Amino acid sequence: MNKISELKSEVLDVLQNNILPYWEKNMQDHENGGFYGRMAGEEKLMPEAEKGAILNARILWTYSSAYRLLKSSEYWEMATRAKRYLIDNFYDKRFGGIYWSLDYKGNPLDTKKQIYALGFAIYGLSEYHRATGDREALDYAIMLFKSIEEHSFDKEKNGYLEALTREWNEIEDMRLSEKDANEKKTMNTHLHILEPYTNLYRVWKNDELRKQIKNLIEVFLDKILNKETNHLKLFFDEDWNGKDHIISYGHDIEASWLIHEAALVLEDESLLKRVEDIVPQIANAAGEGLQPDGGMIYEKNTETGELDADRHWWVQAETVVGYINLYEYFNNENALEKALQCWNFIKKHLIDSKNGEWFWSLKADGTVNTIDDKAGFWKCPYHNGRMCMELLGRFR
């Protein structure tokens, strides 16, 4: 247990002195409200960058969770700032749902309803309620849950559609980002509906919500999981035909523990047994991307054999949690060693001890990536902050 005690001490230090202060000090927009949209590589603030729903919702989740665990008033203030801005600026008061982005002054910019963004808003709002008991946050989380179920859930073929227009009509470009395939259903969005629904169920024991969480877990086991390889398939048409040849090692390891977490929270014994039979297999498949230095590479194209061998910050954070989960629930001592090796990789290569926060990645050539964002639309305190808080919460 000395290894665990040391790990806890180190992640608490990184959380309190490296990750959280960075956002408090650098990213609060006191002129226009909320948070700045972007800190480019090499610490260049972009005060007029668009403000993304994902960034705001993830800040809300991170500081709510930090306040719940550590009870610091400064975390409450950051969480409350994010909650207020999400409800007052990102929530579409006419049609419901969350805008994808705002301009730097807080006006709607991209008004599409990307279901992934609604999911993260639920995640943040439910965590704020969990931490503070705030009823308004819970009410908005429930409204967003109902919007997803009404507009995105495919009642005929199961699963959730990626995106819709502001008015909830069909939309031509459903991609989450430019690197994604333009398909109607994706693993990534389903994972990040499962995650907030699970958190919402912790504080709102609703029968319909419970039914949909159970269904989502079964969708992962029956449709998204490749039963031959134990990797997750990424893109699908509306009939669940697979549309890609990519293995995403970070999503595999992240899904291994998030699916398990959902089954644990549901307390459905037969479903939990089914999940626990497959969780180690998904994690082991993800381990194909682990490198001798402890880092996990990004992805592989199974058609061409091409590797993206960059070690992204978020993939490393999820790798630590995924292997800690195997150690905690499956008595896997080897998984603990893998988690510790990955944590050592993070400490050596990704934590910016000079300026705070973590770098985007260590590139395949061994150099630190200081070009991609330090904070931005996708670079948020959620993956690395959550890694720290998962370890603190699991071994209290």
Image (spheres, helix red, strand yellow):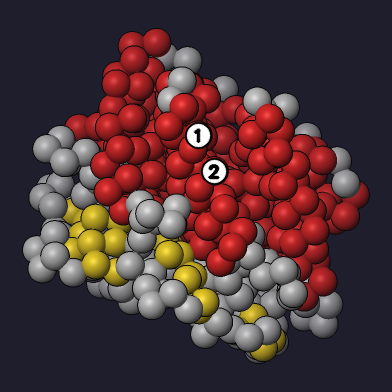
Q: Position of residue 72 (x, y in %)?
A: 88, 46
Q: Quadrant of residue 352?
A: bottom right
What label does residue 50 carry, if any? none
- Residue located at (57% from left, 35% from top): 200
The answer, for residue 236, to whether it is visible in the render is: yes
Give the camera-side residue of 372 and 45. 372
Mark 2–mark 1 distance (CA, rounded to whole Å): 6 Å
Q: Is residue 12 left or right of residue 179?
A: right
- Marks 2 and 1 close (CB-CB < 8 Å): yes
Q: Secondary structure at mark 2?
A: helix
In the orientation shown, which residue stands out farthest toward the top? 269
Q: Which of the two residues, 259 or 139, is positioned nearer the viewer here?
A: 259
Q: Which mark is residue 336?
A: 1
Query: Which SS class for mark 1?
Result: helix
Asked whether residue 57 appears in the rendered view, the answer is no
Q: In this rendering, would 114 be left or right of 370?
A: left
Q: Check disc 2 and report the residue beneath it.
A: 340
Taking depth in this image into account, of 91 and 391 the one nearest to the observer is: 391
Q: Residues within 10 Å of mark 1 (few under 14, many from 20)?
A: many
Inspect the image, locate mark 1, and give the three-letter code of the amino acid beneath it. Leu
Q: Quadrant of the N terminus?
A: top right
Q: Residue furthest right?
A: 73
At which x and y percent is residue 258?
45, 37
